[in-house]
Image: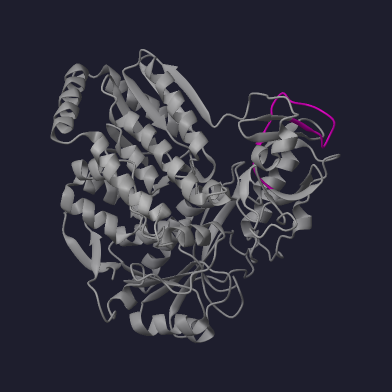
Amino acid sequence: MRILLLAHSFNSLSQRLYTDLRERGHQVSVELDINDTITREAVALYEPHIVLAPFLKRPIPPEVWRARVCLVVHPGIVGDRGPSALDWALLEGEREWGVTVLQAEAQMDGGPVWASVEFPLRAGTKSSLYRREVADAASAAVLQAIERIESRTYTPRAARGSDPLVRGRERPVCRPADRRIDWQHDDTATVLRKIRSADGAPGAPDEIFGRAVRLFDAHDAAGLVGAPGAVLARGGGALARATRDGAVWIGHVREERAEPGESRRALKLRAEMVFCAESVQLPEQPGYAPIRYRERDSVGVLQFEFYNGAMSTTQCRALRAAYAQALSRPTRVLVLAGGSDYWSNGIHLGMIEAAASPAEESWRNINAIDDLTGDIATTTDRLVVAAMRGGAGAGGVFMALAADEVWAAAGIVLNPHYKDMGNLFGSEYWTYLLPRRVGAQHAAQLMQRRLPMGVPEARRLGLIERTLPAAGGETLETILAWALELARDSGFAARIDAKRRRRAADESAKALESYRTEELERMYRNFYGFDPSYHVARYNFIYKVPKSRTPLHLALHRARRAPRGRVVSGVLGDGTVHEESGYV
């Protein structure tokens, strides 16, 4: 079917549905919801069988939903209405939640239901649940709805009707007051619910050291106690604050407003960095540890979980030091297990934006992640596995390719390209690591097409060796079990020998540092050159500046009509170029 994906932005859920629908043979084009005229034009150009809206902030124009089947993906159970569905579910401690696919009508979230899928609501952040459980349920529900539409025999049911089992109800927008923390009376569980219901936007309102902030990235600070509301300690970039019955770590905060006379808007940053002067007076405590190491028999597992997958200069250096320490252990297999939400998204654009010189911090950051990637690529005394439990983008993808094997959880989305960030050239040794897996021609095509990729396609292309279960508590145990199989394999010694010989042959053909030097020459121009595209794109990304048009590599219906240029499309698993979507 021809499906027009209409969204406020091409966010994580939109990308997940885009990759899943294409994997099942549907033709998918994207139009960003800029205004009604643009939407009507997109529908006229593409003539879709279905308009699918996974993430909208306003209604679909009536003339569109009256003429076409328009499906709205609502992150709530059947009968739920309102823009803060997941927020309220977390705040009110729901045990089960779901996703409903409704047909657009005049009443928002009130049209007939084509499909719904429910799931247990774990104690996670709103953003984490959205990327994992909501995305899984939305994919299943959308695919089911499309099958029912194709069958021409299914009649969608009313969103409410007289069914006594329908639990959903209409709820208002979740306001700041609904999430405001009462530190004197709220227990730890309540504080965590309030902060998690607002993570990653808009954040829970609060005051710390007399400054109005929004709170994000909260975790239980087990073992810490103090006067309710008191800031007790610092650790790993976070601040611990006492609740009525314990304490919580606050990992990230964003000031409500910039300081007087400061022109730049406030950024979401590590709490210890925002309150730098106050933090130095606090005792340092263990507990908030984004980098952890565990070992079983001959397998080491180095876990790292950085907020939103962004890796700052400091974090890259810390992970590199942890990697070196892990190499000192007598293991045969070393697993790099990224976070359950993200493996890595490469350099930390937020920290770069906050720096006195974004160009200089960009340079420090790219060199720090290159150092780490180079260490992984030159490890020859054991097997290294990159275990992706969460998605990855840009440099994070190529850092993973430095490992001997890449394992990825079903349902995650990869973005193996840099160009969306102001035509950034990229580093992390991608000019060496990518062609050795997919060949020079396919590497060039992948880097140009700028499209998200699902795990099945990544496996066909040779970017991934094994598919893990969808991210969950059991995934780490599966990773460890598979790694133990590698370590105990009878051909392990021969594989290590072959690895050493290949690295030596590659080095003889062209020194690894030559790839880095060539990449960084291009990156230097991105950072310091006359073309400001990277700096503009970074600013727009950090501050979520809405796009004024849909990029042509997403808008298939517009790319086909472009007056100049050549449409380069997605690379299929068989290596052919499919003239369906790409860029001009």
x and y percent of residue 443 in the render?
22, 51
Instruction: Establish if 551 lies above or below 377.
Output: below
Q: As drawn, is 21 to the left or to the right of 100?
A: left
In-front residue for pair 478/552 = 552
Please indicate, yes or no, whether residue 416 appears anywhere in the rendered image: no
**Residue at left 43%, top 58%?**
534
**Residue at left 52%, top 80%?**
35
x and y percent of residue 117 in the render?
50, 55
How many numbered badges does the structure rendering display?
Answer: 0
In-front residue for pair 382/528 = 528
x and y percent of residue 417 in the render?
34, 53
Q: Is residue 515 magenta?
A: no
**The N terminus: image quadrant:** bottom left
Instruction: Establish if 568 lies above or below 573.
Output: below
Colour option used: one colour
x and y percent of residue 128 in the render?
54, 47
Instruction: Establish if 415 lies above or below 496.
Output: below
Magenta segment range?
215-232
**The C terminus: image quadrant:** bottom left
In-front residue for pair 81/400 = 400
Instruction: Establish if 398 lies above or below 54.
Output: above
Q: As drawn, is 565 to the left or to the right of 184?
A: left
**Residue at left 46%, top 51%?**
136
Q: As drawn, is 526 to the left or to the right of 200?
A: left
Please indicate, yes or no, whether residue 199 appears anywhere in the rendered image: yes
